[in-house]
Structure formats: structure tokens, C-alpha cells
Amino acid sequence: MVTLKEIADKAGVSIGTVDRVLHNRGRVSKENIELILRIARENGYVPNQVARRLQKNRQYAFGVLLPALESEFGYWQQIKEGIEDARRELNSLDVDIIYSFYDRRNPDDFLSAADRLFSNEISAYIMAPLMGGATESVMDSHRAVPVVFIDSSLPGTMPFCDFSQDPIQAGVTAARVMDLFSPSLDSVFTIQTFRSAYNGRMRAESFCRHYDSMHGDIAVKSINIAAEDDFSSISEILRQDGRVGIFVVNDGVHKIVDWLSAADDISRFTIIGFDLSPENRSLLESGRISAIIGQRPRSQGYEAAMFLYRKIVLGQDRHIVHIPVDIYIRENIPEDKSWV
């Protein structure tokens, strides 16, 4: 029996478009309606039983467990905007989305936020697995509820889907880009703000390994910043002579650049970070940041929410989806003002 996904692939349209045609929801062009109905008829399409329940106005609630939106320079707001894009598409399908937010520096607050989320009747949920053992505890307590990861993977767990960037590939990419911009550096640093975060840790470690394979004579030093607003631990960088390479493993790279403004010659720093936040975009345009690695937070949120619809409604199997490693330099900054 053909599925909605197979019909969508054959017609060259989205699953949402196929759903709207087959269930007479929303506006679709006449050409697409005729094409989709013909493909469905020729392939013996039979509506999924879960989809039939949706037609009977059964409400599905998808939970979202995220760090506070105002934290980390707006990164999580981008994730939420992507989820809201999906919510608008799913609005006619009786799908609701319920949020619960927490302070990612506080595991107890994470667990409280999870309790608040699951006090609702959740059909499935989206979570950034940033809390290690606390994340596993939530998953163990709600094993019957499908979960989708965004932002990061977590070894030893089995989500139904994982929309995150491969952190090892991202770290290797950063090392290669660093070498292309500045093949002759005198010292190199990685900077992290959340040592417990799996993706940040893996980015830094893979960067160090790959850079060492290219420049074994330069030891890469890793610095951990204890708080978002305390950058005194990087004072050591200002004391370095010669050309210095800096890889910041998250979107806080603009804060590092602000701190380094006290240097006598900031042009001697080659700086690579993550995410096209407005602050990072401006510094990339001015040349004070050499390159930005993008991880498409808005797309992560959108795809995660749409996958839950496909999982619950269409019974799609578990799989892993790695977000591409995008590289932005001064010459190819996209016009789209979202973090793409």
C-alpha cells in the first residue's frame, strides 16, 4: 500500500500538500490536486487509521522542552520560531504544541520543567538533550512517549529521530577552515561555555585532534568559561604574542570578540564560531569574525515538529537526520535575516 510520503515523492510536493488534497483541507493548486489524486488512485492509496482518527477531531499534543528563550543570545528562540512555522502548517490537523522552558544550568529546573510538560497529555515531544543523566531520567520515566532530539545527540539513548549537527564533523570542519584562513598560527584555543554539553565538547575535541594532525607543533589549549557573562578566564589569550586562532563552540563568539577588543591589534586573531545571530552576522560582515558555522536552528525546530506529525500520523520509523555543516564567510552571508 502506498503511503503519503511515497505519493509526495512521486508528485514532487510536500507531505502536507498531499494531506491537504486527500483530506480536503486548505488551498492547493488545481494542477497539484489532479496530480496527487491520480497518483493516489493508480497506487491504491488507503488512508492510515491514525489519520482517520485525526479526521474525527482527535487532538494531538506535541510537547517541547527547551532552555529559556532569552538565554544563549536568542538561539533557542530560533528553534521555537521553526516549531511555530510547523504549528501553522499543522493547525488544520488538530495538532497542538505545548512548551515548557528551563534554566539549562540547573538540572533540577530541567526536571521541574519536564514534570510541567508531562502534566499535560503529550502524544510525543521534542527535547534538546543537554542535561545528560537528567535527560535519560526523563526518557526512562516516559518510555511510551516518542521523543525527537534537536540541537545535540546523546550517546546511549534511542530517540525516534535526531535533528542535530554531527559535532565531530563540525569540529573537523572548523579546524580545516582555521587552517585555510591562517596556515601559520602561533597559538590556538578552543572556548566552551557549557562543559557538560555533549555537542560542544565533541566539537572542541574533534577540532583539537584534527588540528593536531595538521600542525603537531602547535598545542591547542581548551578554555571553559564558567558563566555566560564572565570572560575573565580568557585573559590569557590577550597575553599571547603573534597570530592566534580561536574556535568558539557556540553562538557566544561575539562576546569573545567584545572581550578581545582590548587587544592592541585584533586583526591578528582568526576567530571561528557558530550561528548567524544578528551580533555574529555584523562581526562577520566587518571581518572581525573569520567564519561562522551554521546549524540551521530554525530548520531544526520545523523539521522536528513535522517529523512528529509524520511519526504519529503516518507511523514513520526511527531514523537519524544530521543537519548539514554550513560555512559562512564574509563573501557568502545569506540575505535571510533568520539564522537559516
Image: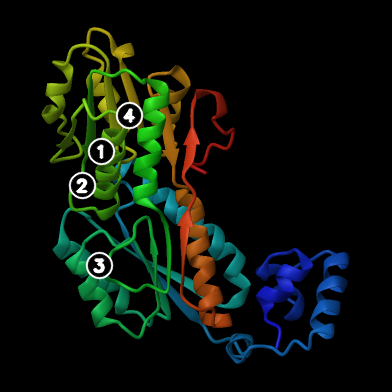
Mark 3 falls on what kind of element? helix
Residue holding disc 3: 113
State left or right for residue 288 relative to residue 6.
left
As drawn, is 194 to the left or to the right of 170?
A: left
Residue 19: image x %, image y %? 69, 75
Label 4 sits on residue? 254
Q: Residues within 10 Å of mark 2 (few under 14, many from 20)?
A: many
175 up-or-down from 284: above or below: below
Residue 277 visible? The answer is no
Q: Residue 148 in the image: x percent, y percent? A: 41, 69
2 vs 4, front mark: 2
CA neighbours of label 1 inside 10 A, class few (<14), some (14 to 19), many (20+): many
How far, Cα to Cα, is label 4 from label 1? 21 Å
Query: For the residues marked 2 and 4, what is the alpha-carbon distance in whole angstroms?
Result: 16 Å
Calculate the distance from the C-alpha at mark 3 to the C-alpha at mark 4. Answer: 30 Å
Q: Nearer the viewer, mark 3 or mark 4?
A: 4
